[in-house]
Amino acid sequence: MKNKAIKKNKDISKISSKVFIWMQVTVLLLCGIFFAPPLQVMAEGFRYTLDTDGELIIVIDPGHGGGNLGADYNGFLEKEMNMTVANAMYEELSKYEDITVYMTHTDVETDMSIKERAEFANSVNADFVFCLHFNMSPDNKLFGSEVWVSAFGEENREGYRFSCVQMETMKEMGLFLRGVKTRFNDKGTDYYGILRYCEEYDIPAALIEHCHIDHATDVEFCDSEEDLIAFGIADATSVAKYFGLSSEELDVDYSDYELVTLTPGSLYVQADTSDPDICMIEKNYEDMDRDVIGVTVTAVDYDSPMLYYSYSIDGGLTYTPYLSWPETDVMAGKSPDTFTFEIEVPDGVSPAVKMRAINQYDRYTESNLLEGYPVFVHTPQEVPVEDTLVSEETTELEDVSQGDASGNGGFKAPERPVKEEEGIAFGNFLKLCLIVVILIVVFLLISNLITSFRRSQRRKKRKRK
């Protein structure tokens, strides 16, 4: 009997040990959920090893050429601009060590197909392709700098990571940022041919749209050969930072340049094909003395940040040029949900206000209509004699669409609490679900162990009888 009692105690001990182990595992899992850093922080900040053959090779592709002029507007011809930038980029990159640089073509009259450009890159065993362009838009509405990358695999990841460097470079130059984007064709593959063909050859590529040649905000960055050369040098600097290059001639060393950290296996930018989810406006104030009204807008897009807004005071018949959405951080994917802007009302007008909120992919949602304002009658004011002696330059109106590189422009948003991101709330929900699943599994395992022990004891009792 004593041996049986000892054996029984050992069985109980085993069960207790297993229960204790599972309790420890549960505690560790729960601690991991609550206290582990986000995956993007945990991921290794590795630098993608592109030069697997021991030599770093990049290809510069000046967009368009020959009969393919590219954007042609108000004296600007894109194929010529692209070549000037490409030559400057090639010359600057040639000053760095441990890199071989090619150009798909060096003559502005060469007309290569998109496929031929990608084939050339593949023939020289390129590690990255940089396709250079300038932009223009329907009705000359858009302004700013952007980069297009493949929507697939490693080409998406590394295209995005280079583009983060390029966007920072464009921001330092003073350009408004339109961000990093992907686009699909009707077959579900990359819309832009150079990205599509390079992806087929497993070559990361970036299509750089430096700025818009048809908008006053951007023209000042590209209206001289010196400006275009500056773009080429800036592009080369972005490449050098991305690859961690150094140059004795330039006395720079980017070997320790810190790239954005990525989670292995994740895609980092995907096209937004939907309009903003919400756009509403409400009256804030009206100031008859200054002939202005204040309007508060609330607009939300759950897929991409807002970049611009535009308003109408004639019920939506006509709209202002696009204005930069205040305090947008396109690279972080954030824009304020609410801000107040001011409208100057012309003499004799009772405004009927509408607004459009435009997202990163240039899709917009129109707001409700605000009516019921009085007719604004401007009161003539006496102007002191000394104030009439103003130079012609100081009377020119400032371009209201001008914004700084961080996306600030138009009217400043009032201070307001930062709204918690949806992603954080959704992440907490996933954590809660995972906790419930773990607790259920642990409960079932413990129940199973206890049930097995009891069955074992019953069998032993039967045998004794």
Image (spheres, rainbow, N blue to C red):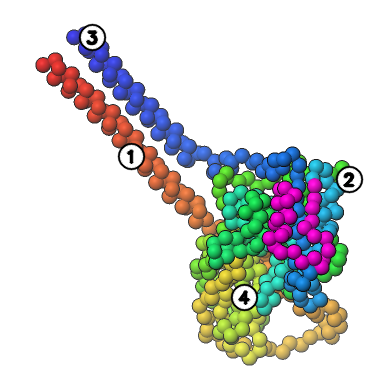
Side of 121 where 318 appears, left or right: left
The residue that disc 4 covers is 310
Quick one: label 2 or label 1, which is nearer the N terminus? 2
Q: Secondary structure at mark 1?
A: helix
The residue that disc 2 covers is 249
- Residue 191 location, x and y as percent? 61, 64
- Residue 461 location, x and y as percent? 15, 19
Viewer-side residue, 149 vs 359:
149
Whether tag 1 and tag 4 are in contact, CB under 8 A, the answer is no
- What type is the residue that disc 3 sits on? Asn
Quick one: label 1 or label 4, which is nearer the N terminus? 4
Q: Which of label 1 and label 4 is nearer to you?
A: 1
The residue that disc 1 covers is 440
The residue that disc 3 covers is 3
Q: Which of label 3 and label 4 is nearer to you?
A: 3
- Residue 423 location, x and y as percent? 50, 53
Res 294 visible: yes
- Residue occupying image coordinates x 52% and y 55%: 421
Give the quarter of the image for residue 139. bottom right
Q: Which residues are magenta?
A: 100-128
